[in-house]
Image (spheres, helix red, strand yellow):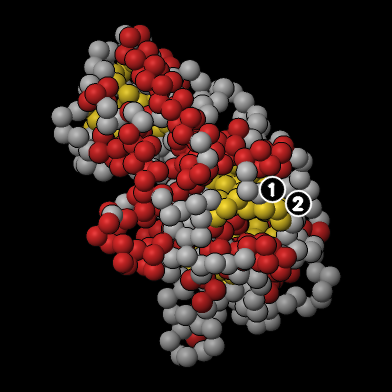
Amino acid sequence: MSTSSDVARAVLAGLQRGGVTDVVLAPGSRSAPLSLALHAADAEGRLRLHVRVDERTAGFLALGLAKGGHRPSAVVTTSGTAVANLHPAVLEAAHSGEPLIVLSADRPAELRGTGANQTNRWQSGLFGGAAVAVDVSPGEVDAAVYAVGHAVRRRGPSQVNLQFVEPLLPAHPGAPGLEALPPSGRHRTHGWSETDPETLASGPRTVMVAGDDAGPPARMLAQRANWPLLAEPTSGARTGTHALRSYRLLIDTELGQEIERVVVTGHPTLSRPVTQLLSRHDLEVVSVRGRAGVATDPGRVARVLDTMPTVGGPDDERWVQRWRAADRRTSQALDDLAAGGGDALVLAVAAEVGLAVRPDALLVVGSSQPIRDLDLMGPVYEAGQRRLIIGNRGLAGIDGTLSTAIGAALARRSSRALAYVGDLTFLHDMGGLVIGAREPRPDLTIVVANDDGGSIFASLEQGAAPYTASFERVFGTPHGVDLAALCRSTATPYDRVDDVATLRELLAREVDGIRVIEVPVPRVNRRVLSEQIRALA
């Protein structure tokens, strides 16, 4: 029977063959064969190794590497609760179609249910339907390589559970490393089906909705059809001549009531007006499946297509021109509101971040309020300039965002890498800044809009006057944490700014390594600000 070290080396060779260039390791005892094989592979320049002490951070770092590099990445853990800490990242990968490979080291199957140390009887298949799982018996090299070969070709996450038996270490410390295997060159593409596309008839007043990861096909269809393009910042389609910045405010106007057909692709999640639009029974709703295989249809009213449709020709110019005129007026009103400062400072901060995303740049946006502020204030960019704006929108959680941003910045060659998050998102993944001195780290600027709590809840039902007595403690959750002290604890360069001009100056500087810019913003009147914004259109 092959040794555990043989299995580990074969697994990593299979990853390399499948185009994996980065592997994240959260160290442990049972995963020692993989750890040593990874160290050798990194020293030989065949893979790039990233070591993290926290499995949750490790999982989201691997997710960011997959997002930024458009290729599969892998994360290695030991047995026991270590694997369970990957669950949030796995769920996000499952809902966004990211190729995340979990290599979980395990005890032999005969120890399950015996009370043996760090042996979880449910470890293989722990993620349920969120990840395809293969349980590999000790010494089964062929089965391990076969499982890895399938994992690198899948969309979404996979778990390869490797049962390792002693001896966990090779007989000689200088045992051979990875065999030389050329990478496959495989990379991620948008998953449009190869079936013949349907042609949509011209005529109905149509808008194109592009949610997260919709990609350039949404923009190209909107331009060919001459439709208004309602594109979220992380859609990959908020560029060109037909994208509208203030679209979500326009949906509830008389112009929005004239819509007769909606074509949606990607995963739109940012606003209730868009969700309500996609759920209307009086419209024709056409939903195109995204890479993860999901067709967005919250109202269960859509006709689902597996392939991006085509159109017979461009629609009436007057329709898109009316949307453009309304967008110009509303966008100017937003800019005027932001320029007034005070409670609207947070809008000005979002605008500055959006302007700092130059061509070839990367921006990772946190969930909750920052992505929604950027949606209102971020510009519509020129097409073809290779900006990449991403976020964890599969399940829209705030966890793991710093690690995702670090991974994406490590994986993508960018003219600049930025992250824009709220204070709770920053605190939730503060461990992402715990990086060993010898570990790869990107040049990344993290902008934290700090309103000392959860401002997004102020604009929801629980922010209304009847709930004032309970709001601060159970929704607002003020924490009073000193972000500067936290940054000092991880030797992360830190700046605090109180005005937009200083923020603009700092964002214009080149950065070496990771730095944090904190911008305190008010939260007390956030509900009033939200009402002012809605009234602009």
**The quadrant where residue 42 appears:** bottom right
Name the outermost residue toward the left: 282
**Residue 472: percent from the left, percent from the top?**
39, 65
Q: CA distance from mark 2 to mark 1?
A: 6 Å
Quadrant for the N terminus in the image: bottom right
**Residue 519: percent from the left, percent from the top?**
60, 50
**The quadrant where residue 220 appears:** top left
Q: Is residue 18 above or below residue 254?
A: below
Residue 77: which disc? none
Quadrant for the C terminus in the image: top left
Q: Are marks 2 and 1 in contact (CB under 8 Å)?
A: yes
Q: Is residue 508 above or below residue 6?
A: above
What residue would you read off at disc 2? Answer: 513
Residue drawn at point x = 65 percent, y = 31 percent: 358
Q: Is residue 352 above or below residue 7?
A: above
Q: Amino acid at mark 2?
A: Gly
Relative horizontal placement of residue 98, taking residue 165 as reference (left or right): left
Q: Decide which of 173, 197 is in the foreground and name it.
A: 197
Residue 444: which disc? 1
